[in-house]
Amino acid sequence: MKNKFKKLLTYLQLPLLYFFDFIFKYKIKKYIFVVGVDEIANCTFYFKKAFHNEAVSVNFTQNKFYQNNKYDYSLGIKNIYLRYLIKIFYGPYLLAKLANQSEVFVYFWSTGFCLERELDYKFLKYKNKKIVCIFVGDDVRSRKLTKEFFDEKEEDHFINYIINSKNENSVKRVAYLAEKYSDIIFSPRKVQLSYLKESIDFFMYMVDDNIFHKGSKLNLNDRIKVLHAPSNPTVKGTALVRAAVKKLKVEGYDFEYIELMNRPNSEVLANLESSHIVLNQFYAAMPGVFGIESMAKYNAVLMSPDYENLPDGSKNAWVRTKYWEIYDNLKYLLDNPSKIDEYAKNGYEFVKNNYTEEKVKEFYINTFYEHKIIDDKNIFKK
């Protein structure tokens, strides 16, 4: 019944979309990129920040971790039902408007301006626009394929602890539509095992140039500060972190442990400023944005190994820690404080060399040019 109702509303959006397209038909081109339409891990915000006036940002949902972010177009409505109702009309309006002002639509996550992303796709192809899909997690990940991958390695994964499994047909459809309509797809192939047949498996995180903390924060007489900031305790392995911390405390180790559960990004960054060791995530196959931010803040980071093709310098950028090694590796750093500084420096240099606004912008420009998303790289040098 729910899907039928959504489909009915989509039929309502179709004439609205083309009506608004007629209204905005002679809008003057103002942007190269439209980026959105939902905020995930600061991706929309930082893309807009990197490309400045060449991009326009859209965020239709309230992300509790990034409430201070500003977007060019947003729905600042917390009530999910009211937001849904407004989107029925506002989505087609804004899509038509921006399609007459811009050339390239960059999508993070699997949502769209319209209730059904396929309606976005069809309209943008009708308008001869370029479509970029960047998938960042559960939007495209197959839980079935992920489980099979880690079962083969005889390793546990957070997938095994998620009770309400996403319907495989839904992620199959996300992958199918992306490959049918988009001009380029970004999706890490192992951390996000999916039904995509082809994609660029190098997902570029981006961190604000202002958050870097250069130089050691650890003095000989300091009490070591250990930070864990899970957005989801099951996914991040928080139970295992607590067990390791408890065992070390019982054994007499003196350190400060800070746990920030579901806290805003601004609060997490403030705590990263004074922490020395970060316990990130232990079931994942990539650092995640928190891991990158932690290294930028000059912390020694413990997190699971990556299975992706990351840039040079990743091998020693953090303490590779399987979910059963948290106690051992944290103990090692507490016993060898000089190693805290060594890993913090390695991680800092790794992020500085690969994930600044300038580096990531350059990566996107080169990749977009190579795949004919843009015709001229020099337009960004003005």
Image: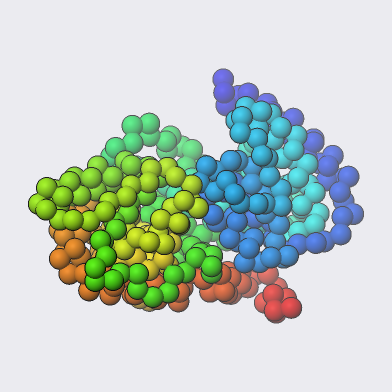
Quadrant placement of the C terminus: bottom right
Relative to 361, 149 lies left or right: left
Q: Measured from the top left, where is residue 164 in percent x and y?
A: 38, 31
Q: Residue at x 61, y 72 (%)?
A: 365
* Residue 313 picture quarter: bottom left
Q: Measured from the top left, where is residue 155 in percent x and y?
A: 21, 50
Residue 94 position (above or below residue 345): above
Q: Nearer the viewer, residue 187 or 212?
A: 212
* Residue 298 picture quarter: bottom left
Q: Residue at x 24, y 48 (%)?
A: 241
Q: Measured from the top left, where is residue 293 in percent x and y?
A: 43, 62
Residue 268 position (above or below residue 357): above
Residue 175 seen by the camera: no
Q: Measured from the top left, where is residue 184 in percent x and y?
A: 57, 61
Q: What's the coloring here?
A: rainbow
Quadrant placement of the N terminus: top right
Q: Nearer the viewer, residue 274 or 59?
A: 274
In the picture as drawn, the residue positioned furthest to the top comes out as 1
Q: Residue at x 51, y 59 (%)?
A: 186
